[in-house]
Image (cartoon, grey):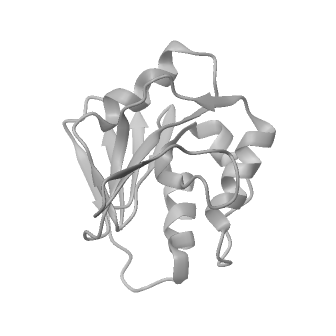
Amino acid sequence: MACAAAASGNRILYHNFPKHTGSCGYNLTNYAIQKAKGKYLVFFANDDIILPNHFNNYLEIEKTDLDFMYFNSLIGPGNSVRVPVIAPSRIGHSEIIVNTMLAKACKPHSPRYGHDWDFIKEISEKGKGAKATSTETTYHIMHVPNLGTVDFID
């Protein structure tokens, strides 16, 4: 399922594919990037919980000249904080906010495991990014129904 949300946070639109379209959610991610119309794009998956500070923290990027930022996450059920690093298995889609134009300039996600790392590696090579100054966690990784992707619409 993919969803888009207005920057005001008052409206979330969901899209469900009529059938399962492949492993790792790559089709869903490609669809969301293709349809995104806002200035920024953030991702979340079926095992993520969006915390109350999620969008406020992500919008820290607006005070910078960065193309993407990445944020700490809370890993459940043990509630440990993961401090992401731009390296394989050390960062995921849900820990980043990326300029939509940069996301659209990247290769489409593939069905190969690790397509999220391929995307993050590509945005880090093509754009300017940094770790957020906030040490707060932006999302909590747990097991919940699939929620999809959020597009900040200007």
Q: Position of residue 12 (x, y in %)?
A: 25, 48
Residue closer to the observer: 43 or 135:
135
Q: Is residue 78 above or below residue 42?
A: below
Q: Position of residue 102 (x, y in %)?
A: 67, 39
The mark tally for this picture is 0
Residue at image x 25%, y 68%?
144
Residue at image x 57%, y 70%?
26
Describe residue 99's horizontal placement relative to residue 117 as left or right. Answer: left
Residue reaching furthest to the top:
63
Hey, which quadrant is residue 10 in on the image? top left
Q: Is residue 74 above or below residue 22?
A: above
Q: Position of residue 73 (x, y in %)?
A: 41, 46
Q: Is residue 120 above or below residue 10?
A: below
Residue closer to the observer: 29 or 142:
142
Residue at image x 30%, y 54%?
79
Residue reaching furthest to the right:
125
Describe residue 54's horizontal placement relative to residue 151 as left or right. Answer: left
Q: Position of residue 135 (x, y in %)?
A: 42, 29
Residue at image x 36%, y 82%?
18
Q: Quick check: can you spot residue 65?
A: yes
Residue closer to the observer: 76 or 121:
76
